[in-house]
Amino acid sequence: MIVAAGDTPEERANPIVEAKTTIGFYGAMPNYAFQFDDLGHTGMRDQLRDCLRAGDNARVQALITPTRSSTSSPWWRAGTTSPTA
């Protein structure tokens, strides 16, 4: 589990970038990439790998969406009962 904590969107902005970067890094590795395939995001490993090789962190951020970064539920804000994007 990767947590991006903060009480406001502004406080969560940097932790979300860090979380997406972490997911992008591991998603580009062969030992972890199968999870994207299992969730129907076939080819994500190759896209992430290409971004990392090119140093294109902005593209990694764009590829890692709440749907792609969660195996069982979308991103949730603490203290709520509904997901947020």
Image (cartoon, rainbow, N blue to C red):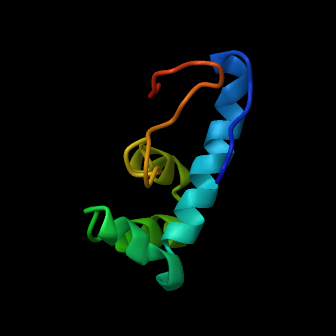
Q: Quadrant of residue 85?
A: top left
Left or right, 8 with respect to 75, comes to right
Task: Give the residue drawn at x 49%, y 73%.
Answer: 28
Vertical side of 64 occupied by 13: above or below? above
Q: Is residue 55 visible?
A: no
Residue toward you, 35 or 16: 35
Task: Give the residue drawn at x 59%, y 25%.
Answer: 77
Q: Position of residue 49 (x, y in %)?
A: 46, 73
Q: Quadrant of residue 34?
A: bottom left
Left or right, 44 with respect to 13, comes to left
Residue farthest toward the top in the current orientation of the protein: 8
Residue farthest toward the front in the current orientation of the protein: 81
Task: Give the residue drawn at x 54%, y 30%.
Answer: 76
Q: Position of residue 7 (x, y in %)?
A: 73, 17
Residue toward you, 35 or 45: 35
Q: Position of residue 14 (x, y in %)?
A: 70, 35
Residue toward you, 67 or 80: 80
Task: Give the residue drawn at x 45%, y 49%.
Answer: 64
For the N terminus, the quadrant is bottom right
Vertical side of 4 occupied by 23: above or below? below
Left or right, 46 with respect to 60, comes to left
Q: Is residue 45 visible?
A: yes
